[in-house]
Image (cartoon, grey):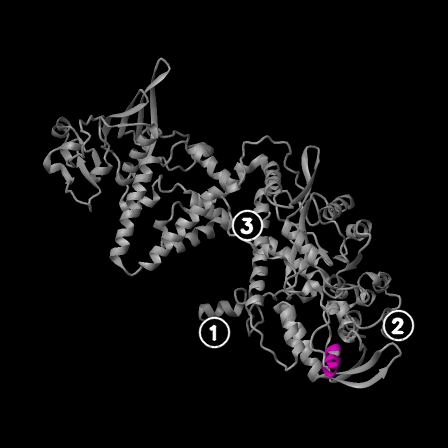
């Protein structure tokens, strides 16, 4: 049924006889057949019944939204925008209809109700064939009605020729319009929200619930949970086979735009094999804090199962800091050699100490590449094997465990002392022939602290706990389903969070005022030099040097030095220890036998005790380690331009500013009803003005691709020179769960005992079988 409406360009008058022609009204409807034709904003449509029993719905929409026949538009997008706005107010969705063509030139175009089309015929099936009965469930909603507008095309002008607004299906109520097709289309801001949440390992379902809570209800959210999940899946499909290429293009863009950015990669058989990258801030962090380096491989961070290897250190706030990161396909010696060489190529200098676990490849690779560094194994990984290597009878019934721990963790003893005490310990517990203990003793120079006592900063990291903590933080953001592009975004998000915590610590250090616990001037000097975290440790040494240490002996030497014996009272163990401090009266230099300055980089309580008695008010410059200073890093490291989470493009900056301005206005006027109503009217008029110029769904595929490209941050139509890596097979790839060791199994709770069945007291048999039980039911007992 098609109805032509002769409406002028002026605002139309809304009444039933204007909506449809008089002939149609007289032939189809009578006054007593009108179910609801009262006008008003509370009635969204008119409903009519024909004598044949057919029901029709006519929208009751404000005049400014109704299409006007004879009105021309410069582009088809403007026509589509106008009709979609009308359809949204009326309660139906729009789809593009057929186009009439004459001599290859389009002359007419239809815009129809989305329910236009012939219904799907009922499917016949054989009742004897079970497979033919099962059919797919669908939400098929076509009802073959002709509500539409016809647009003529001539001389780059689009004119509305006819308009039919009669529907043979119920229109969507105002309270259900958030479920309509046009409302379920995800806006760009919603897609960006889903993507940003995924970078923090928050899935689409939780993202939907978060957005519902933020916007105050389901009706204020575009899309359903299914739409949210579909978008996450579509984003991975959109990246698809171009993943590795887009990933490298992202690194190349940073190389072109960021100062001192470094990345290096290898390709094997046309596929990405390994990659390493480090930015300027990572290099500055390594220059300041790269004395001790730890690295450990982590898994399940991307869909290709490439091994993720971040290089981690400790900054001047005792926090983890990343010096760079790499992805390798295999954990072979060749891969690790390439990775460490790429690290050296990026930073130029070797660390003093390299910390890793007992991976066989790392044991060979580290001395091979870092020729000027000392390699150290993680003590925790070695000591945690005690329950699985030594019998439980010996560990549980003797003090072997505590004796070993006291020996190997002792940072004060010399190598000769360790060796003698180790031999005595084995003889005491009769473990001279224990293979694992002898094997660990043979590599004692790789993990026992006594063999690193001469190395600067040797006690900054004795285990890979900082590295594993950093790895766990990276895995909080990334999942095993992520593409390389998504993994890179997750990595940058986590690094940005890491640098934010560093910036917060810098701010607290610069804004904290001095509050001393002693009357010593050297304490205030330490506060002015060190960061808050380091000063807290130095302050403890100063306090204990004043209250728990005293001098027992003092001897002069020939070179203007004093040998001073400092007694330290250990209240925890109720013992006293004596340390010797060598003090130079000329330059105020001092060295202690505890070697605290060598091990950790700041003076010990014994030296501060001597300085207190010698009236030294300032820490000598030679004992101020640059890595612990407040100004260890340049200030531009914390600038906005150096942050990953900031989009510097002008459009993004303006969008954020608009959101901030609107939020600020709403917060200020939240209790003023008139001000809020005025703001709503202004924003609504602005929205109508914008929507009249911008179609809601023109070239939907193209706009969707543009949105995807903006979210990914790279154009997708680039030639693919490097293919995606193959799915790697590394440690643990054949198991779905982690394999537990004997020590962990011993700590596990034992399984619950099966519940015992109750027995009959008379015959000792289970009640259902018991004769006594049956007799009791029959009334014998």
Numbered circle sitting on residue 420: 2
Q: Which residue is mark 1?
A: 781
Task: Give the mark nearest the N terminus, 1 or 3.
Answer: 3
Q: Nearer the viewer, mark 1 or mark 3?
A: 3
Q: Position of residue 620 (x, y in %)?
A: 73, 71
| Residue 201 highlighted magenta (yes or no) | no
* In the displayed structure image, the side of residue 106 where residue 436 appears, left or right: right
Q: Nearer the viewer, mark 1 or mark 2?
A: 2
Foreground of the two, 609 or 187:
609
Q: Position of residue 643 (x, y in %)?
A: 56, 51
Q: Pick the quarter of the image with the N terminus.
A: top left
Q: Which residue is mark 3?
A: 641
Q: Residues within 10 Å of mark 2 (few under 14, many from 20)?
A: few
Point out the residue furthest to the left here.
Answer: 31
What is the C-alpha distance between the residues marked 3 and 2?
57 Å
The answer to whether mark 3 and mark 2 are in CB contact below 8 A is no
The boundaries of the magenta stretch are: 607-614
Residue 738 appears in the rendering: no
């Amino acid at each position: 049924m098609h109805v032509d409406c002769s409406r002028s360009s002026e605002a139309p008058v809304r009444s039933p006889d204007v909506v449809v022609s008089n002939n149609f009204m007289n032939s189809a409807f009578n006054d007593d057949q009108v179910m609801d034709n009262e006008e008003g904003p509370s009635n969204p449509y008119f409903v009519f019944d024909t004598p044949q029993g057919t029901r029709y719905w006519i929208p009751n929409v404000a005049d400014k939204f109704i299409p006007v026949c004879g009105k021309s538009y410069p582009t088809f997008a403007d026509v589509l925008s106008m009709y979609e706005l009308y359809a949204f107010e009326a309660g139906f969705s729009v789809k593009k209809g057929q186009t009439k063509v004459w001599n290859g030139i389009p002359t007419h175009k239809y815009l129809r109700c989305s329910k236009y089309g012939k219904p799907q015929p009922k499917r016949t099936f054989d009742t004897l064939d079970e497979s033919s009965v099962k059919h797919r469930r669908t939400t098929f909603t076509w009802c073959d009605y002709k509500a539409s507008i016809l647009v003529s095309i001539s001389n780059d002008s689009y004119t509305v020729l006819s308009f039919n607004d009669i529907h043979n299906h119920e229109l969507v109520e105002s309270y259900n319009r958030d479920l309509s097709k046009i409302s379920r289309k995800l806006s760009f801001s919603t897609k960006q929200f889903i993507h940003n949440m995924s970078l923090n390992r928050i899935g689409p379902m939780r993202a939907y619930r978060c957005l519902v809570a933020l916007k105050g209800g389901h009706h204020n959210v575009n899309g359903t949970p299914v739409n949210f999940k579909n978008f996450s899946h579509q984003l991975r499909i959109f990246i698809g086979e171009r993943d590795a290429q887009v990933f490298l293009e992202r690194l190349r863009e940073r190389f072109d735009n960021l100062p001192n950015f470094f990345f290096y990669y290898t390709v094997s058989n046309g596929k990405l094999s390994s990659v390493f990258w480090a930015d300027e801030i990572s290099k500055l962090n390594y220059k300041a804090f790269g004395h001790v380096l730890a690295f450990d491989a982590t898994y399940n961070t991307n869909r290709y199962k490439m091994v993720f290897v971040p290089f981690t250190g400790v900054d001047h706030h005792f926090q983890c800091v990343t010096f760079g990161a790499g992805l390798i396909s295999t954990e072979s010696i060749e891969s690790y050699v390439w990775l460490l060489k790429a690290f050296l190529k990026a930073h130029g200098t070797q660390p003093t100490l390299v910390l890793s676990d007992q991976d066989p490849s790392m044991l060979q690779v580290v001395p091979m590449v870092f020729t000027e560094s000392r390699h150290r194994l993680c003590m925790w990984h070695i000591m945690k094997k005690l329950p699985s290597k030594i019998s439980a009878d010996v560990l549980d019934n003797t003090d072997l465990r505590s004796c070993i721990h006291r020996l190997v963790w002792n940072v004060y003893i010399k190598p000769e002392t360790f060796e003698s005490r180790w031999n005595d310990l084995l003889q005491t517990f009769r473990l001279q022939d224990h293979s694992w203990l002898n094997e660990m003793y043979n590599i004692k120079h790789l993990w026992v602290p006594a063999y690193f006592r001469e190395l600067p900063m040797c006690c900054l990291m004795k285990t890979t706990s900082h590295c594993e903590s950093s790895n766990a933080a990276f895995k909080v953001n990334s999942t095993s389903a992520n593409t390389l592009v998504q993994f890179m975004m997750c990595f940058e998000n986590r690094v940005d969070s890491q640098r934010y915590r560093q910036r917060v610590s810098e701010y607290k250090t610069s804004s904290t005022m001095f509050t001393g616990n002693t009357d010593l001037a050297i304490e205030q000097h330490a506060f002015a030099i060190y960061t808050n975290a380091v000063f807290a440790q130095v302050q403890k040494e100063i306090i204990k040097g004043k209250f728990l240490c005293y001098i027992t002996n003092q001897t002069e030497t020939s070179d203007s030095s004093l040998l001073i014996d400092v007694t330290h009272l250990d209240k925890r163990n109720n013992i006293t220890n004596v340390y010797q401090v060598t003090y130079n009266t000329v330059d105020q230099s001092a060295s202690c036998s505890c070697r605290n300055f060598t091990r950790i980089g700041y003076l010990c309580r014994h030296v501060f005790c001597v300085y207190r008695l010698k009236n030294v008010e300032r820490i000598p410059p030679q004992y101020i380690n640059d890595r612990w200073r407040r100004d260890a890093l340049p200030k531009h490291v914390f600038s906005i331009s150096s942050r990953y989470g900031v989009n510097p493009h002008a459009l993004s900056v303006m969008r954020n500013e608009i959101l901030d301005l609107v939020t600020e206005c709403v917060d200020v006027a939240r209790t003023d009803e008139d001000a809020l109503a005025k703001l709503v009217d202004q924003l609504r008029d602005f929205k109508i003005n914008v929507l009249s110029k911008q179609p809601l769904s023109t070239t939907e595929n193209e706009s969707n691709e543009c949105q995807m490209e903006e979210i990914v941050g790279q154009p997708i139509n680039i030639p693919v020179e490097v293919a995606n890596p193959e799915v790697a097979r590394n440690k643990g790839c054949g198991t779905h769960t982690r394999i537990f060791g004997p020590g962990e199994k011993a700590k596990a709770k034992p399984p619950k005992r099966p519940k015992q069945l109750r027995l009959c007291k008379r015959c000792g048999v289970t009640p259902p079988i018991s004769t006594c039980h049956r007799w009791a039911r029959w009334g014998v007992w």
